[in-house]
Amino acid sequence: MRLQALIALALLTPPGAAEADALRLLAELRERHLPHGMVLDPVFQSPEGDEIAGYSRCGDSAVWTGHLLAAEAYRYAVTRSGDALAGVRGALNGLGVLLDVTGTDLLARCAFPADSPFAAGLVGEERRHGVYGGTLDGAYWQWIGNTSRDQYAGLFFGLTAAWNLVPDPQVQTSVRALATRALGFLQERHWFVVMPGGEISTTFLGRADQQLSLLKLGRRANPGRFETSYKALSLLAAPETIAPVALEVRDPHEAYFKFNLDSITFYGLLTSGDNWWLRLNYKKAYDILRNTTDDHGNAFFNMIDRAINGPNARRDAETRRLLDAWLRRPRRDSWVDLRVVYPSCRQEDRACQPIPVEQRVRTDFLWQRSPFLLYGGGAGTIEGAGLDYILPYWMARYYGVSQE
């Protein structure tokens, strides 16, 4: 659906202004952030202009396409609309491209046609990760390697949400196929992520929480292939989910994106059934995480907590306020420096208390950035995709936190 039509739909939406905002942001995302079917962020000619000069943030395209899939799955669960179902299928297709293009079921960070007018800029920005080639439907594509665990976490978060919320047979078949391919690649390589030349970009060894989260969806979607693996690893390693989280929360500011990855990992582990002993260990690990982030003013983490722990009046009221505040933020990455506004604590770039949402640094996905960050941003030419509103908004609607 074209941008103008979706905006018209948003403006006519009966339930309220918040849904209109969510639909408007989705319309803009579809029009400007999916040039090749996966989430990228446009770079404009100038901070004030609307002419797109290129695209950026290709290295995390798999993560955010997974988040887009989750957002569309929640939207479908609320509205049962054909457009939401089409959005789910579109995001699944994009994620499928990221597995297809490598030729081995390795997940690419991002991919784009080699003859795209934006290819040179994307290659220049991501060259450090390795640029590879592959053929899709007879066309030559380029893709970015050095795939991290982050990309797999984003993929499986989206797949898990779609499996949980979208009972459409075509969607279920696609989720099963993508999860099987991605997991099969990792298992066959003993949880090492191996590039085409044999280089190892990362490993899941030492992260039982992430292995189990991926395997749990595999077990649910394809029990014949993965149930034995999940049961064996969970019985041995469920207590080991605690240690890496306990280590990460020792610094609640640096590499804050780790908490987004942890949150979506525990979404996979704790939003479907298991025996009491496994849930006890998973919950202990999650509680360590949540006890660190619950006062960070984070709408997305609040909604993950709602999915895991159920209603909480104080938290849910805060979520509504945080989403309202997000709408008052600029979308582009203009530079922010709050050192003259708020005192720092322990580090030059760290405030003593979480900064109000309206003032926080402009970024790709607000909820994966430290709420204490005092300065950062860019030239004001890169536009965020808006998933940091769209996703928690539709989660809030689904769980009854918001009525409009």
Image (tube, helix red, strand yellow):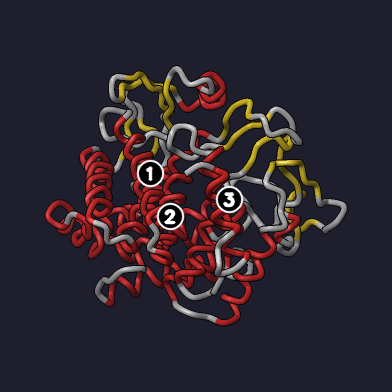
As shown in the figure, which amino acid type bears the numbered disc 2? Glu
Q: Are marks 2 and 1 in contact (CB under 8 Å)?
A: yes
Does 63 appear above or below 290?
A: above
Q: Nearer the viewer, mark 2 or mark 3?
A: 3
Image label count: 3
Q: Which mark is residue 90?
A: 1
Label whose residue precedes the other's in the sequence (1 or 3): 3
Q: Badge 3: few (under 14), some or many (20 or more) residues near its Cα, within 10 Å? A: many
Q: What x and y, as percent, mark residue 218?
A: 24, 54
The answer, for residue 103, to whether it is visible in the render is yes
Q: Real-space Cα distance between discs 2 and 1?
A: 10 Å
Q: Quadrant of the C terminus?
A: bottom right
Does dot 2 land on a helix, a strand or a loop? helix
Q: Are marks 1 and 3 in contact (CB under 8 Å)?
A: no
Q: Is residue 117 left or right of residue 373?
A: left
Q: Is residue 81 left or right of residue 231?
A: right
Q: Which residue is mark 2?
A: 72
Q: Residues within 10 Å of mark 1 (few under 14, many from 20)?
A: some
The spot of residue 125 in percent (x, y) is 56, 25
Instruction: Residue lying at the far left in this picture: please name it.
Output: 224
Find residue 7 and name its label: 3
Determine the secondary structure under disc 1.
helix
What is the spatial separation of the Cα atoms under label 1 and label 3, in whole angstroms?
19 Å
Residue 123 badge? none
Check if mark 2's residue and mark 3's residue have beta carbons within 8 Å: no
Crowd rating for badge 2 (residues with CA inside 10 Å; few <14, some 14–19, many 20+)? many
**Marked residue nearer the N-terminal end (2 or 3):** 3
- Relative image position of residue 245 (x, y in whole percent): 46, 60
Give the residue type at disc 1: Gly
